[in-house]
Amino acid sequence: MAEDIAVMVVRAWDEEEITALYMAGEWWKEGSKTEDLSCLILGSFAFAVAVETNTGRAIGMGRVIADGVSDGYIQDLVVLPQYRKCGVGKRIVAALVDRCVQSGVTWIGLIAEPGTEQFYMSLGFHPMEGHVPLIFLGES
C-alpha cells in the first residue's frame, strides 16, 4: 500500500479533503470554516499531504509553523485510520523535517498526543526534560 502513496509539500489543497483529515484527527472545531483552510495552508511554513496516487485523494497531512530562521513546530499530523501503521505518518514527518533542515530551521519541536511518543522517538524526537507544554485558555 505504501508504494501507492506520494507525499508532497504543497501551498494549496482541496479544502473538503483537508476538512475530512481534521475531522479524522478529531481537531475540527464547531463553527470552523472550510474556506479558512486555504489561509491555514498558505500561512504554514510547510504543509505536507500524503496522496493516494491512483485517486489523487489526500489520506494524510501534517504541517510546520516556523519563523523560517531558527525554530519550527510540527503539528496537525493525521493519517486516515485505514492507512495507519504502514509508514505514511513517518513519510509525512520526514518530508516536513527535510523542508525545515533544507531551510536552516534545525530546532524542530512538537507536542505528542499521549501514546504517540514512541512513534516520534523512532523518528529522532526526544522528550524535553524540564519543560511543560501549556495552552492559553484565557485569564483566570
Image (cartoon, rainbow, N blue to C red):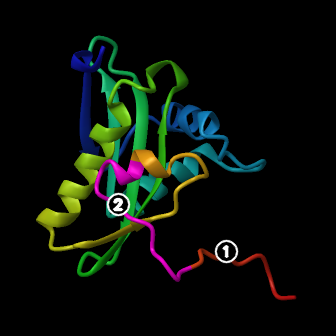
**Magenta stretch encompasses residue 124:** yes
Judged by depth in the image, the label closer to the viewer, 2 or 1, is: 2
Q: Which mark is residue 27?
A: none
Query: In the rendered image of this protein, does residue 68 appear above or below residue 2?
Result: below
The residue under the point 37% across, 38% down is: 89
> Which label number is shown at residue 125?
2
Residue type of the residue flagged with mark 2: Phe
Residue identified by numbered label 1: 135
- Rendering coords of residue 31 (x, y %): 76, 50
Q: Amino acid at mark 1?
A: Ile
Look at the image and give the residue range highlighted in magenta.
120-131
Crowd band around label 2 with a 10 angstrom C-alpha radius: few (<14), some (14–19), many (20+): some
The x and y percentages for residue 25 are 60, 40
**Which quadrant is the C terminus positioned in?**
bottom right
x then y, percent, for residue 93: 32, 48
Dot 2: what SS? loop
Residue 100: quadrant of the picture: bottom left
Q: Residue at x 50, y 18 (%)?
A: 82
Q: Is residue 23 above or below residue 44?
A: above
Q: Is residue 10 left or right of residue 82?
A: left
Residue at far left of view? 102
Decide which of 70, 9 is in the foreground and name it: 70
